[in-house]
């Protein structure tokens, strides 16, 4: 799957901006500066700024770092695992991985890795996948 936001179109940008706004709101609610947040999350301050402005294609792993700090939920179900579970549920018995891949132009190996929660996936990639499947991208991350 591609990481090019141009290929994901409007949905990729909207998902990225939706999470950017949510993370900014959470940080401000906690009364943290970007510098303080960066120390707690374990990233550079400029990265926090880029995430909050929607300029960076946030990986699900880094999204989880922010959410663990902002929600104070260590050991929460990871975004990778949520995506894997929701994709499997959406696919159900209707499509095999191979059929789904052929139908929507997604490599079966990519689907397999996502469903095993072993793929490093980003918000843009989730939006692209959701767009191909005709699903709201936030539904795949619930």
Image (cartoon, grey):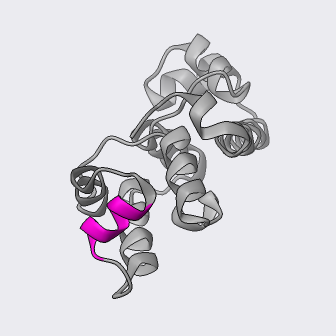
On the image, which quarter does residue 82 sit in?
bottom left
Tell me which secondary structure the magenta stretch mostly adopts.
Answer: helix
Residue 142 visible? The answer is no
Image side of residue 71 versus residue 64, left or right = right
Could you tell me which quadrant the N terminus lies in? top left
Residue segment shown in magenta? 96-103
In the rendered structure, the answer to whether residue 101 lies left or right of residue 8 reads: left
Whether residue 117 appears in magenta in the rendering, the answer is no
Tag count in the figure?
0
Is residue 21 or residue 107 the one in the foreground? 107
Figure quadrant of the C terminus: bottom right
Residue 17: image location, x then y, percent? 73, 37
Residue 55 sits in quarter: top right
Residue 17 is left or right of residue 1, and the answer is right
34, above or below 8, in the image:
above
Residue 56 position, x and y percent, is 58, 24
- Residue located at (73% from left, 40% from top): 10
How far from the left and from the top, in percent, is residue 113? 23, 54
Judging depth in this view, the residue of 61 and 94 nearest the camera is 94
The residue positioned 41% from the left and 80% from the top of the image is 89
x then y, percent, for residue 57: 55, 29
Residue with the most extreme front position: 102
Q: Decide which of 116, 40 is in the foreground and name it.
A: 116
Q: Judge whether 99 appears above or below 121 on screen.
A: below
At 29% from the left and 63% from the top, the residue drawn is 115
Q: Is residue 3 above or below residue 75?
A: above
Q: Is residue 98 visible?
A: yes
């Amino acid at each position: 799957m591609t990481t090019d936001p141009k290929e994901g179109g409007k949905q990729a940008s909207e998902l990225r901006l939706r999470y950017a706004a949510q993370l900014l709101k959470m940080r401000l609610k906690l009364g943290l500066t970007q510098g303080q947040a960066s120390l707690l999350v374990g990233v550079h301050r400029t990265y926090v700024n880029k995430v909050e402005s929607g300029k960076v294609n946030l990986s699900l792993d880094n999204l989880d770092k922010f959410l663990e700090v902002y929600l104070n939920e260590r050991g929460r179900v990871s975004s990778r695992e949520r995506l894997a579970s929701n994709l499997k549920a959406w696919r159900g018995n209707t499509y095999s991985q191979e059929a789904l891949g052929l139908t929507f132009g997604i490599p079966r190996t990519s689907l397999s890795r996502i469903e095993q929660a072993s793929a490093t996936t980003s918000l843009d990639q989730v939006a692209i996948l959701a767009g191909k499947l005709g699903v709201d991208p936030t539904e795949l991350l619930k």
